[in-house]
Amino acid sequence: MSGGVQITKMGMKIYNSLSRQLEDFVPLNPEQVSIYSCGPTVYDYIHMGNARTALVTDIIRRYLMYKGYNVKLVQNLTDIDDKIINRAAELGVSAKQLASENGEAFFQDSQRLGIHPADVHPKATEHIPEMIDLIQTLLDKGAAYVIDGSVYYRVNQFAEYGKLSNRKPEDLLAGARVEVDERKEDPRDFDMWKAAKPGEPSWESPWGKGRPGWHIECSAMAMKHLGETIDIHAGGEDLQFPHHENEIAQSELATGATFARYWMHIAFLKIDGTRMGKSEQNFILLRDALDNYPTEVIRHFLISAHYRHPLDYNQESLTKSAGALRRLNNCLDALKEYDQSVETNGTTATPLQHTVQEMKAQFTQAMDTDFNTAQALGAIFTLVGEVNKSLTNVGEKTDPAFAQAYQTLLETCQVLGIYGTDTQESDDHNVEQRDQLVQLLLEIRQDARERKDWETSDKIRDRLKELNIEIKDTREGATWKIVA
Ligand code: AMP
Ligand code: ZN
């Protein structure tokens, strides 16, 4: 490690929404941290608000790995839900097709933002048996009841209901009344299994055909892939109630174990002071933002505020992030030539060496304290400023601190993913361009054949063959494939 600051697993604190306090972070298994993050409902492309939540999870994972932990991250895809069914009906496609297309788009967009895929991306529709088992367990315990093929959770069976959202029973009742269902025993009760309505996708169950409720999906998938107790459960702040409250109620009543040890809720990305959201119609799609700004600029912007503080989307902030990234890139470009280990005599550190050490300590301190990315960026840019000053001081160019500064900046920027992010975008772009060029050659060859210009036609076929691209003439026209 550069800069003389040792990275250890010690010292991390996380603000736990459950205790409403900053707590020391001690994972259940000292070697591996388990994280479950509520993923998107795939009825549309993701917007910048969804991206904030996904990016914070990515950074939590990157930082834990930097600290020396193994991390197992599970992020679900909700691929069956009212919104999906309604949107699919509007578009005249099946719910399955809509969810599958938007699921793919989600992976593409996340990758363009430099977010590594989770270790598991479970889909709700692929975990119906696990959900049915969990519902059955709750029925067996008297914590659920069936009405007309739907199964409801009996909230009064779980004494701790409300502990996450810190709501009193009266508040919970007020909230629940919005959605009146006379058949429920208690307005707070919620459905875990919905009896099938005509024309909707459905699955067989002991209670007849139907589909799962949203909350049971996450309980079942989290427990299947991470066990009864997980370390960190993350999601946007809108999910704290009722979604996460209900996940706790289902899981803890079924197993008797703590469901999640640290609950993290990410504050909203706003636009003109209101939450960015699909229903608010004020959203900027992540893919559109990525067409206008480099990955690193968008990442910088999305982590420029601490994750528990709201962040406002506006042009000015993105322009500021672009400016900051330019300074960072210029500094790293200038430092590149110093990237060789420089022997230090071990006795006297230069002022810039002190700054590097201090910066690394500040970065770690900021990230250790509930992943304070805003302060971590502050530490990085303070060092950038100091390096730039020293670089203009001709006499100091032999300072070994330059190599250390370079290494430290690389290391810390990689944790945040704001430098040299491998998004695979350029690879994808190259492949797309190759495909278009081959297609163009096939068209030219077709024209030649129509003119009976066999020489040109054969030349194109033979030269492509040399490039390992094989053309086959079929009745429907020429096709091509890559051969080894
Ligand atoms: P959804 O597709 O609406 O279920 O949302 C997927 C994830 O994005 C959830 O964790 C939400 O809490 C989160 N989310 C939605 N809107 C925003 C927003 N404006 N800012 C931050 N996170 C959001
Ligand atoms: Zn969830």
Image (cartoon, grey):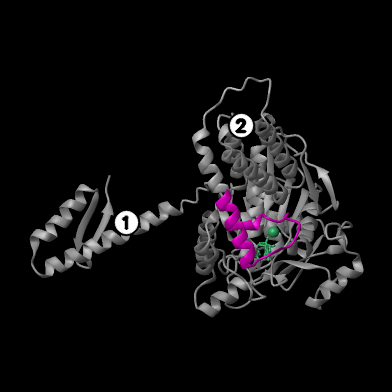
Q: Earlier in the sequence, mark 2 or mark 1?
A: 2
Quadrant including the N terminus: top right
Q: Which mark is residue 401?
A: 2
Q: Nearer the viewer, mark 2 or mark 1?
A: 2
User: Regarding ligand 1, which quadrant of the image does it lie in?
Assistant: bottom right
For the residue pair 247 and 154, the one nearer the viewer reads as: 247
Report the amino acid beneath label 2.
Ala
Q: In the rendered image, which residue does mark 1 sit on?
A: 434
The answer to whether 90 is drawn above or below residue 36 in the figure is: below
User: Residue at 73% of width from left, 71% of height from top?
Assistant: 273
* Location of residue 253 by image quarter: bottom right
Local secondary structure at mark 1: helix
Q: CA distance from mark 2 to mark 1?
A: 44 Å
Query: What residue do we see at 21% from left, 52% from top?
Result: 464
3, 170: nearer the viewer:
3
Locate residue 91, reporting x and y percent.
Answer: 51, 78
Q: Could you tell me if the residues under marks 2 and 1 are in contact, i.e. CB atoms within 8 Å?
A: no
State left or right for residue 219 relative to residue 128: right
Q: Decide if residue 331 is in sight here.
A: yes
Region rendered in magenta? 301-327
Identity, as a three-letter code, of the amino acid under mark 1: Arg
